[in-house]
Image (spheres, rainbow, N blue to C red):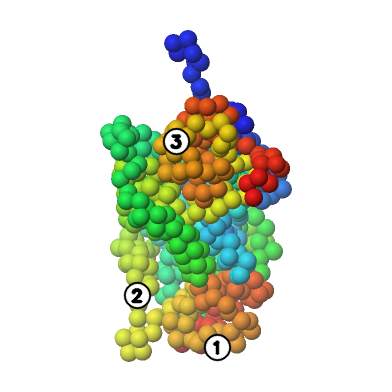
């Protein structure tokens, strides 16, 4: 696309988000249509549970301990979890920024919030409170796995905003999950990705791949001009300009901070595999 | 890495699509859970599997999986309703409960009917439940009640003389089904467990008055989680579910 003589970059991340969002929405719609005997051609009509990788996280302990699949969890959830684990080992938690439809819709609403509140957007939360709240998602993760294993039920369904987003018309959706979804979407107008930041148990788990993924976000201190645009643009409020390598478990690898987008200096903030020398100097 | 977003986008698509394709090829990609009546055969065709029939299966699901009209099924089991698709299999045992303990018309009976109606071989079945005469009439109309089948199942047919259960009786069944979890014996304070089905957990049996030790002794196994269903434990330990549920119900009485 040419605009004013310069080539406008194609936003591949947005295309990816759109593809996965529409795919999940169409499968969910088709599942509903299958129930009333009408199915859209060429689109799967499986239940949303079958294409949710978090089901594997909820059910793996029960599978190991009791050799049973918790009701509503399917083998396909385990397959998807393994594929996302592979992606995370290579690139980090890109599932959050390129694939997850709930993350995408929060981000899209965030653009509206940014237009309304301009620079104030994503800075309403007091820093101290924000710091502690970010640990909450680990509590959610541990609690959900513990409860699911003990009760052998999909307890998270009671508050799951992802399921509510694509099944808000169904009887299976609980009031709790609709409230959590509504709150997450509403808060997205003030805070970037509130569900991902503070409560998402799947994000808590895949976020750990920031510590060991093959590719990492790296800032070249020699060429950096300390403009801190990377930090200002980071949706997860990570202070990129103070780090050499971003290993913060909150990073979603959206790449907004990199020299491809926010950073004005070429090859300064990059997603790359660190060379041996760079790793040694970090130590 | 320049153009990292393009590389991640292509990698994500490739890993997800290829991964699902490979998982599907090696038989790991299953999007149906236990209890789904339709299962995939080797040639990728979805076919109905009567063994997956559960008390919670609806007549609509049976219609889709086996091409048996819900209306026909309702007629076979003597229901007279304007919405036969909404009926669930467990209503069958409730509706024929009046025939007494000796007569078994429940999930196994519907399963047997499906086998016969669709022309599947029934000789491989371990046990047969009773068939109401109304179901046999349907099978005769469809030309499925052959002399061979008749000689095999003649003693299993139960003559039905009572009027068909209409919407009024069905709504009572639905209410009972809804209230099932809350029925408590006012004297003992124990939960009343009238029947054991695929969803009955060990905790349900404990709540009905049997101790965990007694259940373990009866089954001959150690139970690690009371929320496991009796059916799952029987399947895992090669125990006969029907036999076990009857023994437990007997002890509870």
Indicate the chain on which mark 3 is placed. Answer: A
Q: Nearer the viewer, residue A188 or B50?
A: A188
- Callout 3 secondary element: loop
Cα–Cα span, label 2 and label 3: 61 Å
Residue A137: x and y in percent read 44, 57
Quadrant hosting residue B1: top right
Q: Residue at x 47, y 34 (%)?
A: A226
Residue highlighted by disc 2? B182
Q: Are marks 2 and 1 on the same chain?
A: yes
Residue B128: x and y in percent read 60, 69
Q: Residue at x 66, y 61 (%)?
A: B122
Question: Residue A228 shows which numbered tag?
Answer: 3
Q: How many marks?
A: 3
Q: Are marks 2 and 3 in contact (CB under 8 Å)?
A: no
Q: Residue at x 64, y 71 (%)?
A: B236
Indicate the chain on which mark 1 is placed. Answer: B
Residue highlighted by disc 1? B214
Cα–Cα span, label 2 and label 1: 24 Å
Q: Nearer the viewer, residue A101 or B184?
A: A101
Q: Nearer the viewer, residue A192 or A211?
A: A211
Q: Are marks 2 and 1 in contact (CB under 8 Å)?
A: no
């Amino acid at each position: 696309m040419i605009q004013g003589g310069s080539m406008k970059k194609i936003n591949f991340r947005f295309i990816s988000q759109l593809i996965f969002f529409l795919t999940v929405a169409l499968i969910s719609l088709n599942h509903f249509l299958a129930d009333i005997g009408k199915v859209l051609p060429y689109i799967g009509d499986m239940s949303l549970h079958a294409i949710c990788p978090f089901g594997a996280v909820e059910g793996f302990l029960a599978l190991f301990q009791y050799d049973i699949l918790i009701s509503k969890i399917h083998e396909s959830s385990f397959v998807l979890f393994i594929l996302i684990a592979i992606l995370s080992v290579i690139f980090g938690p890109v599932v959050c920024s390129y694939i997850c439809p709930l993350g995408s819709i929060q981000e899209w609403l965030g653009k509206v919030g940014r237009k309304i509140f301009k620079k104030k957007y994503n800075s309403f939360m007091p820093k101290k409170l924000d710091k502690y709240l970010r640990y909450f998602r680990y509590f959610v993760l541990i609690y959900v796995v513990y409860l699911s294993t003990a009760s052998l039920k999909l307890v998270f369904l009671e508050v799951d905003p992802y399921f509510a987003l694509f099944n808000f018309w169904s009887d299976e959706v609980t009031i709790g999950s609709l409230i959590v979804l509504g709150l997450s979407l509403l808060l997205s107008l003030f805070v970037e990705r509130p569900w991902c930041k503070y409560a998402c148990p799947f994000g808590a788990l895949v976020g750990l791949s920031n510590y060991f993924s093959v590719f990492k976000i790296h800032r070249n201190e020699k060429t950096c001009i300390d403009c801190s645009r990377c930090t200002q643009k980071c949706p997860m409020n990570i202070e990129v300009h103070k780090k050499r390598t971003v290993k913060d478990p909150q990073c979603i690898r959206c790449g907004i901070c990199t020299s491809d987008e926010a950073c004005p200096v070429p090859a300064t903030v990059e997603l790359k595999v660190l060379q041996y020398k760079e790793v040694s100097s970090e130590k | 890495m320049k153009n990292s977003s393009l590389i991640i986008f292509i990698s994500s698509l490739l890993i997800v699509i290829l991964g699902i394709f490979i998982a599907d090829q090696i038989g790991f990609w299953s999007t149906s859970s236990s209890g789904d009546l339709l299962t995939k055969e080797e040639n990728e065709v979805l076919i109905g599997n009567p063994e997956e029939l559960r008390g919670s299966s609806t007549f609509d699901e049976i219609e889709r999986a086996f091409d048996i009209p819900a209306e026909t099924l309702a007629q076979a089991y003597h229901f007279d309703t304007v919405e036969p698709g909404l009926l669930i299999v467990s209503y069958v045992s409730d509706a024929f409960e009046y025939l007494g303990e000796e007569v078994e018309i429940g999930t196994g009976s519907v399963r047997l009917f499906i086998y016969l109606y669709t022309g599947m071989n029934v000789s491989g079945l371990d046990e047969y439940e009773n068939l109401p005469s109304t179901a046999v009439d349907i099978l005769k109309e469809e030309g499925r009640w052959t002399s061979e089948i008749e000689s095999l199942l003649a003693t299993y047919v139960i003559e039905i003389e009572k009027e068909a259960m209409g919407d009024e009786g069905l709504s009572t069944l639905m209410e009972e089904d809804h209230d099932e979890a809350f029925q408590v014996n006012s004297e003992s304070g124990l939960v009343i467990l009238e029947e054991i089905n695929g969803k009955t957990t060990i905790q349900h049996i404990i709540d009905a008055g049997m101790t965990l030790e007694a259940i373990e002794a009866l089954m001959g196994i150690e139970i690690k989680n009371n929320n496991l269903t009796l059916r799952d434990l029987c399947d895992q330990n090669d125990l006969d579910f029907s036999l076990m549920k009857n023994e437990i119900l007997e002890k509870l009485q």
